[in-house]
């Protein structure tokens, strides 16, 4: 017997600086139970976490939330992250980021901005975000970012109620001067799961979206990169969630809880450590939540003997939990999964377009 | 949908690394990497050599001259490899081509 080799170094850290957010998106990816402002880590602790992350091998830092601009010390956090040698990406709704704030973030060394887009016109965008005037402010910020030459990614969150606007959305991003667009179809966890009937697109919509993306990749080659995250319920095989559990990245919640992915807290069997209790390296290398599904030893059949286990690692543990009630189950979207009939039944029971349930907003 | 297509390829473009893309020495893995929006590309010695020549925004032809001299390699042999490497990065907006 010998000790297992240490896991490879993580590449990315997602820092959820706060759960506060002016938007009320019905697919919010924050946990059902939010951390209150009083529970948020302070500036010095975040700065220490960034330095520890860089020492551990992290290259990319994503400052997220909630809305990270709700943190008054955002500029100081960007500066601390650059000081640590990290590439700093700000993931924002754009609300609360005036020009003067952008000046300060730019001076602090911000590398890249990823701006969320709830819809391609004010009507749909403000309705989905639950924030009137949000689209206009977002547009103003996007123009300010590209005018400075800062790289901009538009993160277009797509679902049944806006997927038909995909071609227009991609053209909108290119016209704004975005260097990249992420066409991110809603994945169903937490709050999104409660709104699944209203948000899960139809097969016809997904097929059309795939054609639109394939065409746009050629049209915009060299001008704008296009990444597409399809809705996995229509897939034959599961997504390689997080590139494999505990293999490439980690998340730190506003109160310092370290998670293998943003939805990991939905798995009740896991216990998590905080950055205030143990060094980040120790949590990454030996933390029980990270060890739980690392590698392939935890797998049952059909994953255990499956040739695809090196490709998709059994899919997403949180989705197995959400749909099958068992985090060790094969991701139920997989064609080979015992629980796949459950996903097919959900797809067969999609409501008619004129009978979509009302959205339940996150407020 | 917008009808603006990608710019026509330039025969001998000026090659630049756009803002928000930079080289980084990864001290943990002991490798040079290229960092950009949502990307971290591990570079080999050749990739590092090509990208570290871009700071003054050279024309592609001048870049190939320099690399040929630096590696004492036949110019024709490396020209194709350099263009292919840069074209791939340009498609991802990790380098930009310009007329001037």
Image: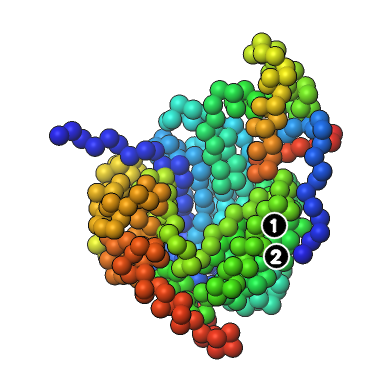
Disc ID at residue B94: none
The residue at the point 36 percent across, 74 percent down is A342
Quarter location, residue A37? bottom left
Judged left or right of residue B29, residue A206 is right
Return the residue nearer the eye: A319 or A88: A319
The residue at the point 72 percent across, 17 percent down is B75
The residue at the point 75 percent across, 32 percent down is B15
Q: CA distance from mark 2 to mark 1?
A: 8 Å
Picture coordinates of residue A82 (x, y %)? 54, 39
Q: Which color scheme is applied?
A: rainbow
The residue at the point 24 percent across, 37 percent down is A4
Earlier in the chain: of badge 2 and badge 1, it is 2
Judged left or right of residue B7, residue A339 is left
Describe the element under mark 1 as helix, strand or loop: helix
Picture coordinates of residue A114 (x, y %)? 60, 55
Which residue is situated farthest in the left direction here?
Answer: A1
Assess disc 1: are there few (<14), some (14-19) or many (≥20) residues with their C-alpha within 10 Å of its C-alpha: some
Describe the element under mark 2 as helix, strand or loop: helix
Picture coordinates of residue A145 (x, y %)? 70, 52
Return the residue nearer the eye: B68 or A291: B68
What residue is shown with label 1?
A216
Q: Tags 2 and 1 in contact by the CB under 8 Å rule?
A: yes
What residue is shown with label 2?
A167
Quarter location, residue A355? bottom right
């Amino acid at each position: 017997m010998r000790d297992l080799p240490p896991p490879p170094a993580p590449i990315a850290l997602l820092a959820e600086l706060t759960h506060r957010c002016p938007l009320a998106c019905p697919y919010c990816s924050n946990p059902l139970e939010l951390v209150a402002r009083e529970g948020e880590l302070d500036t010095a602790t975040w700065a220490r976490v960034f330095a520890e992350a860089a020492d551990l091998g992290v290259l990319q830092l994503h400052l997220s939330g909630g809305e990270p601009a709700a943190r008054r010390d955002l500029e100081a956090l960007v500066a601390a992250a650059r000081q640590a040698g990290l590439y700093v990406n700000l993931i924002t709704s754009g609300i609360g980021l005036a020009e003067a704030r952008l000046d300060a973030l730019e001076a602090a060394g911000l590398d890249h901005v990823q701006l969320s887009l709830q819809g391609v016109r004010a009507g749909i965008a403000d309705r989905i975000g639950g924030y009137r005037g949000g689209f206009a402010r977002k547009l103003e910020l996007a123009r300010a970012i590209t005018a400075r030459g800062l790289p901009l990614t538009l993160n277009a969150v797509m679902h049944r109620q806006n997927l038909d606007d995909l071609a227009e959305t991609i053209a909108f991003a290119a016209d704004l001067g975005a260097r990249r667009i992420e066409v991110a179809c809603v994945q169903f966890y937490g709050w999104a799961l409660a709104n699944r009937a209203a948000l899960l697109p139809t097969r016809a919509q997904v097929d059309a979206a795939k054609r639109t993306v394939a065409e746009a990749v050629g049209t915009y080659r060299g001008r704008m990169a296009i990444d597409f995250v399809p809705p996995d319920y229509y897939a034959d095989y599961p997504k390689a969630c997080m590139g494999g559990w505990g293999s490439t990245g980690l998340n730190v919640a506003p109160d310092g809880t370290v998670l293998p992915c943003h939805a990991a807290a939905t798995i009740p069997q896991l216990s998590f450590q905080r950055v205030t209790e143990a060094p980040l390296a120790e949590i990454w290398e030996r933390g029980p939540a990270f060890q739980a599904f690392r590698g392939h030893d935890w797998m049952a059949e059909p994953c255990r003997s499956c040739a695809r286990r090196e490709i998709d690692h059994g899919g997403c543990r949180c989705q197995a939990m959400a749909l099958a009630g068992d985090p060790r189950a094969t991701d139920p979207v997989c064609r080979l999964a015992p629980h796949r009939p459950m996903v097919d039944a959900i797809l067969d029971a999609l409501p008619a377009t004129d009978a979509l349930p009302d959205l339940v907003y996150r407020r | 949908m917008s009808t603006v297509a990608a710019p026509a390829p330039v025969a001998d473009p000026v090659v630049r690394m756009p803002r928000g893309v930079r080289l980084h020495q990864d001290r943990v893995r002991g490798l040079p990497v290229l960092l950009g929006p949502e990307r971290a590309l591990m570079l080999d010695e050749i990739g590092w050599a090509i990208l570290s020549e871009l700071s003054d925004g050279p024309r592609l032809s001048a870049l190939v001259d320099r690399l040929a001299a630096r590696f004492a390699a036949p110019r024709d042999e490396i020209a194709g490899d350099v263009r292919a490497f840069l074209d791939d990065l340009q498609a991802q907006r990790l380098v930009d081509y310009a007329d001037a």
